[in-house]
Image (tube, rainbow, N blue to C red):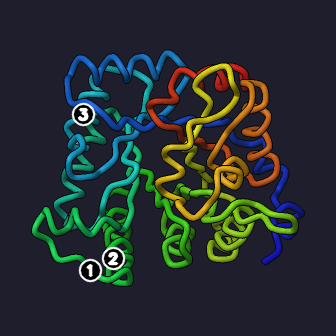
Amino acid sequence: MPARYLLQTCPYDRIVARKFRFGIGIMRGTSRVKITESARRAEDLGYDVLHVPDHLGGPAPFPVMTAIAMATSTLRVGTFVLNAAFYRPALLARDVAALRDLSGGRFDLGLGTGYVKEEFEAAGIPFPTAGARVDHLRQTCEYMAEHLPDVPIMIAGNGDRVLRLAAQAADIVGLTGGDRAPSPGEDPLADRIAFVRDAAGDRFDDLELNIAITAVPLDGSGMPDLTIPRHFLPGLSDEELLRHPGVLSGSTADMAERIRGYREHYGIDYVIVQDRHAEAFGDVIAALG
């Protein structure tokens, strides 16, 4: 579907009805002092959600999120994203319900299919096919919707099957910005959102659209550190990465204007950055008011 279709039909009331939400991903450290200091700092900077990933070798999501919830009063916690294939739905629901209650309802459940084969091998779990992982993710979403309907679910991805499931079963759709940079006549991000719109049908206006930012300038140069996007998009040149929707560059004012554009043109009002971006993007949050 052409990108212009989305831009012409994105409802104006969708653009103005929601305030921005800002999330930040914590990747390092299991010290209680460091975790709670990071969480309180994120809360002070204006972030709404602190996300914990789910990778072997990284922090265990549920204990870390519990510590964050205990140390804060308004900050939500979430997973970005939980490897659903590692969990049986009923057992996962037990942990989700406990964290929902301990946090006073400040929990968003981010789910993904799991994609790192080496982590399955290290855990002694067979690595299912892509189709089987999506099917398990669907079963997990259905179980959560039935037993814990008050816990918002985020599904993040870029492929058709995952985005179709997100459109049909999630509350929040996490977008990667696409697997290529915009070029003349193309807008990969708009195409992915148009796909979600078609798959969601009447529920599209109730979905919250999110984008993950992987690079932000950390000094006064206006140039971002491209380490993360280079890892996830190795086929793109640095010039192409700088045009990618998941990469921000320029001054604080430039970045704030681009984030406003994401809401005005795409209906995206939920933005997630990485912990290394906390201070720099905190200035953008302030500029957005």
* Rendered position, 97 above or below 166: above
- Does 86 sit left or right of 270 as displayed? left
Q: Compare residues 276 and 102 and report the one nearer the observer.
A: 276
Element under disc 3: helix
Q: Earlier in the sequence, mark 1 or mark 2?
A: 1
Which residue corresponds to the image point at 24% horizontal and 33% vertical from the top-left? 66
Quarter of the rendering containing residue 91:
bottom left
Quarter of the rendering containing residue 235:
bottom right
Residue count near mark 2 (Cα–Cα under 10 Å), binned few <14, some 14–19, many ≥20: many
Residue count near mark 1 (Cα–Cα under 10 Å), binned few <14, some 14–19, many ≥20: some
Q: Which mark is residue 133?
A: 2
The Cα–Cα distance between marks 3 and 2, rounded to whole angstroms, is 27 Å
Callout 1 touching callout 2 (CB < 8 Å): yes
Determine which residue is flagged by label 1. 128
Residue 15 locus on image (x, y percent):
78, 47
Callout 3 touching callout 2 (CB < 8 Å): no
The Cα–Cα distance between marks 1 and 2, rounded to whole angstroms, is 6 Å
* Rendered position, 195 above or below 187: below
Residue 130 locus on image (x, y percent):
37, 80
Residue 32 locus on image (x, y percent):
20, 22
Residue count near mark 3 (Cα–Cα under 10 Å), binned few <14, some 14–19, many ≥20: some
Determine which residue is flagged by label 3. 66
